[in-house]
Image (cartoon, rainbow, N blue to C red):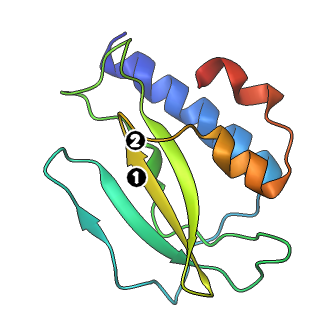
């Protein structure tokens, strides 16, 4: 799988997420945003409504694939974990948790993205 194939899958994943979740750029970004040595991005995003799980996405780069490290075996995964009281953390890494964790936590239908995880 080449870089363009990865980008296509990335776009499909994003479209699947956008069908279920309202995504907006936040004006109240959590300060903990960094890029690690593997060029994967971990970011924290403010959410004002945890009951409805409406997320404010700071950067779509959370879903981008690394063109150097990724291949057809190591497809990037994402996971969600709650931190503090008002923040959501996304972890995006090759060896991370499955994106299903997000959908399980939100009680969403994940059938549309099963083949990509």
Q: Is residue 49 left or right of residue 13?
A: right
Label 1: which secondary element: helix
Label 2: which secondary element: loop
| Residue 61 disc label | 1
| Residue that sits furthest to the left in the current view | 37
Q: Is residue 47 left or right of residue 107?
A: left
User: Which residue shows up at 61% across the image and 42% down it?
Assistant: 14
Q: Is residue 72 left or right of residue 66?
A: right
Distance in Å between CA atoms under marks 2 and 1: 5 Å
Where does the image place residue 13, in percent across and percent down from the top left? Answer: 61, 35
Q: Residues within 10 Å of mark 2 (few under 14, many from 20)?
A: some
Quarter residue 42 falls in: bottom left
- What is the total number of numbered labels drawn onto the structure image? 2
* 101 over 73 or under it: above or below: below
Where does the image place residue 96, in percent across and percent down from the top left? Answer: 42, 41
| Figure quadrant of the N terminus | top left
Q: Residues within 10 Å of mark 1 (few under 14, many from 20)?
A: some
Residue under pointer 2:
64
| Residue 73 disc label | none
Where does the image place residue 47, in percent across and percent down from the top left? Answer: 65, 80
User: Which residue shows up at 48% across the image and 70% down it?
Assistant: 58
Q: Is residue 22 left or right of residue 100?
A: right
Disc 2, disc 1: CB below 8 Å? yes
| Figure quadrant of the C terminus | top right
User: Which residue shows up at 60% across the image and 40% down it?
Assistant: 99
């Amino acid at each position: 799988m080449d870089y363009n194939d990865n980008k296509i899958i990335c776009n499909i994943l994003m479209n699947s997420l956008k069908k279920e979740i309202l995504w907006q750029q936040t004006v109240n970004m959590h300060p903990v945003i960094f890029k690690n040595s593997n060029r994967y991005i971990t970011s924290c995003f403010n959410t004002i409504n945890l009951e409805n799980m409406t997320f404010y996405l700071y950067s779509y780069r959370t879903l981008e694939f690394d063109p150097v490290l990724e291949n057809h075996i190591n497809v990037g995964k994402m996971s969600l974990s709650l931190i503090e009281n008002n923040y959501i953390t996304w972890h995006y890494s090759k060896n991370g948790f499955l994106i299903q964790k997000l959908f399980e936590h939100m009680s969403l239908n994940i059938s549309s993205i099963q083949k990509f995880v």
